Amino acid sequence: MLLLFVVSFVTFAIFFLIPRLAGSSPEDLASRYVGRTANTQQIHQMTERLGFYDPIYQQYGRFVKGIFVGADYSTGPSTVHCPAPCFGYSFLTQTPVWPDLLDRMTVTLSLAVGAAILWLLSGVAVGVLSALRRATFFDRTAMGIALAGVSLPIFFTGLVSLSIFSYWLGWFPGGGAYTPISENPALWAYDLVLPWVTLAFLYAAAYARLTRAGMLETMNEDFVRTARAKGLPERVVVIKHGLRSALTPILTIFGLDLGLLLGGAVLTESTYSLNGIGKYAIDAINSNDLPKVLGVTMVGAFFIIVANVIVDMLYAVVDPRVRVA
Amino acid sequence: MSVNPQPRTDIQVGKSGAPGRAFLDVRDLRVHFPTDDGLVKSVDGLSFELERGRTLGIVGESGSGKSVTSLSIMGLHKPGSVRMSGEIWLDGQELVSASRETVRKLRGQKMAMIFQDPLSAMHPFYTVGQQIVEAYRIHHSVSKAVARKHAVDLLDRVGIPQPDRRVDDYPHQFSGGMRQRAMIAMALSNNPELLIADEPTTALDVTVQAQILDLIRDLQQEFRSAVIIITHDLGVVAELADDILVMYGGKCVEKSDARTIFKAPEHPYTWGLLGSMPRTDRAVRDRLIPVKGSPPSLINLPSGCAFHPRCPYDGRAGIPSRTVVPQLEGGDHAVACHLPPEMRRQIFAEEIAPAL
């Protein structure tokens, strides 16, 4: 919880405090909330309504209060209510940010979690096999492909796979196709196959290399020799004794990667025109819609923090030496 | 054996009256590792026998081939990286030519091993109990509860206090000595008939060393296992071993019963090892006498007698120590040395024994 307050403060500071310290006037900030054609008086009115003349700590208090109990924004003639949790109100689209984010979240969640499962399974499997068959044809081929996977950017692999599998072969739908899982799970998965594979390819490549390095190290550990000396079958030795240790550092990175992606897989979502958090952020930045950008930043930061906390807790589950006695 | 190119020089170490082959019979074992720098001949023509209830100490410096020998018996070398020849007979079964699966089933069951550093040799993520249970259940189809009871009994047997609680602790929660006891409990979980202890006390402090050695001896008497103790520490084998085999450069240079090795050793290398051993039962000498030089490269062993560059008697009496490899000769007390036996005994009596 403390961490979340820190996040809210840092986000707040980035958007409101630092510009002020850097010399922007309250009017400069408020001008972001009104049209570009607004005159000085309108801007002044807006600044007052948004409370930008108040001391910073009051503004921050209001910001936090909005998250917990909601906030009211006066738009001049009327007052709009932004219910809790209020991460801001977009005056541009006349909507509170949070419901939009929630809506987009399902898309990003579908994309990130599906791809994560895919890359974790394939990356770890390829890494383990490569380590066990070190310096064989399989190892060299897999690591060569992995190198390509790490190096090629999403917007390249994404577009290539779209042109081949969607436009040319017609196996999968083109960009922008998305069906909510609640409507049709099969279609949901079918629509997401290409984005999943593209995104997973990038990460799987990195994970395969990490797993391979980890396995090469742990398979030479004394405790693996002990496991063999017990007469355990090689499969048990590799999975229960070798992989179990090699996975620990991968778990850390996995948590962080997933947390980062949940805050918006910007490139993948843009490439496939998926209306997720990442695309929301891009659109918000393009239209200079500050409350939306702020909301996305908060959500992204939130996921990274949560992922970190979960990873820390998982670490204690996985590695008994981390547990506090 | 017909494949043995050397004359049979091994001594009958055991005293089991059973006809035929000894319980463990290693014949002309050669373990070579091809590397980029050349062929590493870690073990080159080693033969010995061991009966149930007996303890063999294998002694030598680092890199003399002791651990490689034990890993060969256990079949723990990586298949691609090693060239093994010779024969290892365990209770009438040949292991070098046996399938990996056959050897795996014997591992942990018929033969078990205690490793040097129990902290790195136990898996940090599993409790001591889980690791013992795993070792037991792979060879016995019993329920987890039964196996756990067995693990508690074993921990109790090796002298771990409150075994029913400690069984759920992780290795890092044990002290060094307790960890080695747990390691021993794990090795004993299937009542192995052959127990190999590879430097079992090296990582432990001196007071704990004595306890662990006592424990191994007691357990051996209880289980009547054959035990191989591998060590560079003659003090350890003095405690435990019935017979001692001294290795140098992948070969056996001297072997006999423990008493003979300590009272009347004949190989100059054995003299060196004895001279470099601290003794607390004698008056304090000025200094320990180290064996001069360093262990030989196993890729390019010195020609002739591998020990000749470090041997103080190299070149005596016109013997061909630099050209001819000395054979292991002698019955119950076999020595691989060019010095004539009378001269060796004379040198030991006149020059070595007074300084020890």
Image (tube, rainbow, N blue to C red):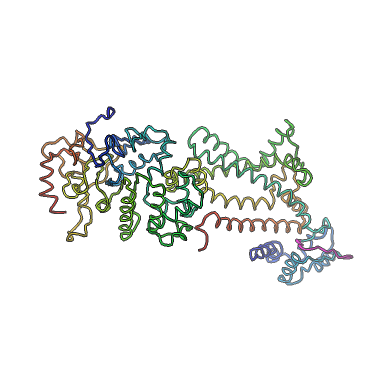
Q: Residue at x 63, y 55 (%)?
A: A307
Looking at the image, the residue that sits furthest to the top is B2
Q: Is the N terminus of chain B in the top left, top right, bottom left or bottom right quadrant?
A: top left
Q: Nearer the viewer, residue B269 or B58?
A: B58
- Left or right of A122: which side holds B251? left
Q: Nearer the viewer, residue A81 or A150?
A: A81
- Residue drawn at the location 46% of the way across and 43% of the way down: A232
Q: Position of residue B189 (x, y in %)?
A: 41, 49
Q: How many marks?
A: 0
Residue A171 rendering spot, x and y as whole percentages: 73, 33
In magenta stretch: residue A81: yes
**What span is colored magenta in the figure?**
A76-87
- Relative to A91, say whether B299 is above or below: above
Q: Quadrant of the C terminus of chain B?
A: bottom left
Q: Is residue B163 left or right of residue A269?
A: left
Q: Residue B337 at what x, y percent from top left?
A: 18, 39
Q: Quadrant of residue A82?
A: bottom right
Q: Main secondary structure of the magenta part?
A: loop
Residue found 24% across the figure and 44% down from its top? B246
Q: Nearer the viewer, residue A309 or A163?
A: A309
Task: Report if residue A119 lies within the magenta region.
Answer: no
